[in-house]
Image (spheres, rainbow, N blue to C red):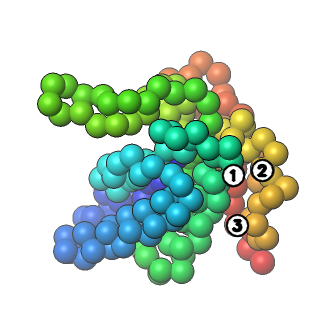
């Protein structure tokens, strides 16, 4: 899972740096709270984005459901907090390798592989307030979406891929 603040560069240009740091820390605290409660491993914070892993390092039976639930909870929490942020979320399910990556004394536990790259790319393509999830992630989850949320299948062009991918666009319905 990747969750990324939209238009952060423009936002940082017009926001005092102390306020920017405070609001970013509020975002990261909300994300961490939700992810840890849903048994995710918060892999890292990267500028204005967060990366989280499900099903690693400990296998989880319901990792797809927990990832989707976390993404929805995060988008709803950002709205309630009144942050001036639009966040796009990317989810993808598949094989990846996990372990320490780095050089010499400086390593970090993370996940790498095509599955992870696609999740990152989907996050970058997701409009603010929405989730783009790989088709295998959404399998069987659509009927279980919370009230007020819906899903549409979409064909998305992903940088580095020869063909478009099928993804699920998950978003809140204006009631």
Nearer mark to the viewer, of 1 and 2: 1
Total numbered labels placed on residues in the image: 3
Give the image quarter of residue 165.
top right
Residue at point 45%, 49% (across, down):
41
Furthest-right residue in this view: 143
| Label placed on residue 79 | none
Who is closer to the viewer here, 55 or 149? 55
The CA span between labels 1 and 3 is 17 Å
Residue highlighted by disc 2? 141
The CA span between labels 1 and 2 is 7 Å
Find residue 129 and report its horizontal and vertical position in percent.
58, 63
3 and 2 marks in contact (CB < 8 Å): no
Q: Secondary structure at mark 1?
A: helix
Q: Going by the image, does 174 lie left or right of 39?
A: right
Q: Residues within 10 Å of mark 3 (few under 14, many from 20)?
A: some
Mark found first going from the N terminus, 3 or 2: 2
Q: Is residue 14 visible?
A: no
Furthest-left residue in this view: 105
| Label placed on residue 65 | 1
1 and 2 marks in contact (CB < 8 Å): yes
Give the image quarter of residue 151.
bottom right
Mark found first going from the N terminus, 1 or 2: 1
Q: Is residue 171 visible?
A: yes
Can you say whether 75 is above or below 125 in the image? below
Can you say whether 165 is above or below 127 in the image? above
Residue at point 19%, 70% (across, down):
17
Residue highlighted by disc 3? 172
């Amino acid at each position: 899972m990747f969750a990324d603040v939209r238009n952060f560069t423009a936002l940082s240009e017009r926001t005092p740096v102390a306020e920017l740091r405070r609001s970013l820390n509020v975002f990261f605290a909300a994300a961490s709270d939700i992810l840890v409660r849903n048994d995710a491993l918060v892999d890292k914070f990267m500028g204005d984005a967060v990366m989280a892993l499900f099903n690693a390092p400990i296998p989880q039976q319901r990792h797809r459901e927990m990832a989707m639930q976390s993404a929805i909870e995060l988008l709803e929490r950002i709205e309630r907090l009144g942050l001036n942020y639009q966040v796009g979320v990317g989810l993808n399910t598949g094989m990846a390798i996990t372990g320490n990556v780095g050089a010499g004394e400086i390593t970090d536990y993370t996940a790498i592989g095509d599955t992870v790259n696609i999740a990152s790319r989907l996050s970058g393509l997701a409009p603010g307030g929405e989730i783009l999830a790989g088709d295998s992630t959404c399998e069987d989850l659509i009927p279980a979406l919370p009230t007020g949320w819906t899903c549409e299948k979409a064909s998305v062009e992903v940088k580095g891929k020869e063909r478009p991918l099928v993804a699920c666009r998950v978003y809140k319905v204006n009631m």
